[in-house]
Amino acid sequence: MRSQSLTRRDLLDAVVVVLLWGVNFVVMKFALRDFTPLQLGAARYVFAVLPLALFVRPPGIPWKWVVLYGLFQGVGQFGFLFLALQIGMTAALASVILQTQVFFTALFGFVLLKERASRPLQLGMLLAGLGLSCFAINYLLPGARGAATVAGTTLAGFMLTLAAAAMWSASNIVARRVQQGGADYSPTAFVVWSSSVAVLPFVLLSLAFDPESTRWQWTGARASSWLAVAYLGWVATLVGYSLWTGLLKRHPANRVAPFSLGVPIVGLTAGMLVLGEGITPWQWGGVALVVAALVCVTTGGLMRRR
């Protein structure tokens, strides 16, 4: 039975995950200096798999869930996100827009799992929709469009980031189905073996779509770029997702989810301070509305319980 109170160790785990995932977006930007998005996807998951796959047994759940999670969370989420960061999305805004996965998850949950949306979730989805409208205005109004381009974002980058959020949501649905099955599995084993699923698709996609002139550029990558890949594979993926999955196994989602509010705050701060990224007034409006939507969803359930 899940515990209702978080221990000091649980709180430390949650804070660590927020910090790791918050700076994750800046690290991606550094890695993309020497890797194409598809090469970075392959490299990230090679690091996530090795060497732990040699020592960690596969999780005791049906392989279809491992494969689906790896395709959605690995190839889908990070394939789209890496492309977005390369062609027109800042690390700061990506950390915020990606959190719309909460609302995509609610939509998919309603369609696929027949889950009803609570009142706080309905209000949160309305606020998130208004926030996305603010982001979209940057690419629809002539004056705002120029400011958005100067700030380092494009409409294609924005849409790809939303696609990444949708893929994250699909992986959340897979994780829910696994939990509904009542399987007792190791979070680390699940992350490691689902990561192995993503390697081959990324390699094949890179061979098929990367320009021939960039096909082998990763061999000349700087040491700092390889350190960034190691961070993405070992720290953000293995440590971050293992800690987060472990928290969700030990506690109800409404106890754990509020900590995710810290990710866009850390991401915004890191992107602006480390990379000097700018944000337009309309984008600030979108940030405020999306964060308000997240607060509404993550705290609404707790307020109703009290």
Image (cartoon, grey):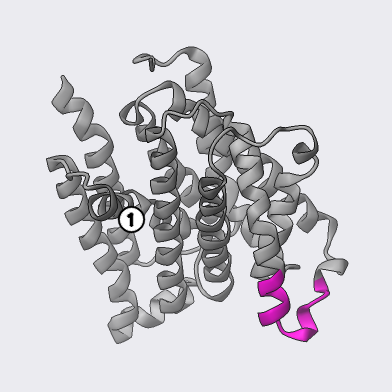
Can residue 31 be seen here? no
Kind of residue at badge 1:
Val
Which element carries disc 1, helix, strand or loop? helix
Residue stretch in magenta: 204-217
Return the x and y of residue 251 as percentages of the image width and height: 39, 22
Return the x and y of residue 23 as percentages of the image width and height: 57, 46
**Which part of the image, by quadrant, shows the C terminus?**
top left
For image coordinates 58% across by 40% down, the residue present is: 20
Question: To which residue does mark 1 refer?
Answer: 287
Is residue 153 rendered to the left or right of residue 101?
Answer: right
**Which picture quadrant has residue 135?**
bottom left
For image coordinates 55% across by 76% down, the residue present is: 87
**Which picture quadrant has residue 21?**
top right
Is residue 50 rendered to the left or right of residue 1?
Answer: right
For image coordinates 24% across by 55% down, the residue present is: 111
Is residue 22 rendered to the left or right of residue 255?
Answer: right
